[in-house]
Amino acid sequence: MDALKKTVLLLFVSLALSACYERDAQYFFDRGNDAFISREYTTAIENMNAALRLKPDFCVAYFTRASSFFSIGNYADALKDYTNAIACDPKYAIAYRFRGVVKVELGDTVNAYKDWMAARAFGDIRAEHYLRIYRKHLPGELKDTAR
């Protein structure tokens, strides 16, 4: 078999495996999402771990795993995964909003506010609620820009 045929065959096999991994990642995501809805957060995290091993750029899996971590009070890992979701999709408005909520839990109101500003800029109208509530907690120089 000449080099070109081998290359084409390898490419075909690689694409076929990639499609299988993506389908399997969706399977684990669906199971994890069902677990999340049922408030089985540890099971949700385990399934999202499996989905992300198969598809490391699965933004919604990061988001759901982050929400699961948040639900069990693991704010550090929630922060990491909301950040991963945003890195995956820089316009992921709801991830900015939820990351802002985590930052408040961690005592970082200023950066939470910045996340809510980004969420609003990317179309999340619910971010406005947090902007109104937390505006009074900002240092003076930020209050002026928070309109």
Image (tube, grey):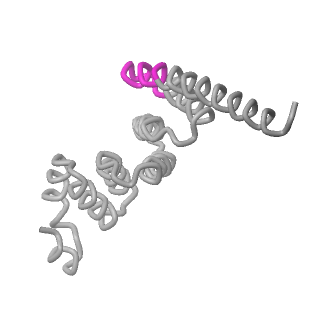
Tell me which residue sits at (25%, 54%) in the image: 122
Q: Is residue 90 above or below residue 6?
A: below
Rendered-image quadrant of the N terminus:
top right
Place of residue 24 in the rendered image (x, y in percent of width and height, measured from the top left):
57, 22
Q: What's the magenta bit mostly, secondary-structure-wise?
A: helix
Residue placed most toward the observer, 85 or 68: 85
Q: Is residue 121 above or below residue 44?
A: below
Is 17 covered by the magenta stretch?
A: no
Looking at the image, residue 67 sits to the left or right of residue 44; the answer is: left
In the rendered image, the residue lying farthest to the right is: 1
Instruction: Tell how many labels.
Output: 0
- The residue shown at (45%, 51%) is 79
On the image, the x and y values in percent for residue 83 come to 45, 53
Q: Position of residue 43 (x, y in %)?
A: 52, 23
Q: Is residue 32 magenta?
A: yes
Q: Quadrant of residue 140?
A: bottom left
Image coordinates for residue 19, horizontal then vertical, percent: 58, 26
Locate the C terminus by quadrant: bottom left
Q: Is residue 69 above or below residue 80?
A: above
Tell whether 10 sits left or right of 120.
right
Left or right: 47 in relation to 35: right
**Residue at 19% of width from left, 53% of height from top?**
130
Residue at 70%, 35% (x, y): give it. Answer: 11
Point out the stretch of residues depicted in magenta: 30-41
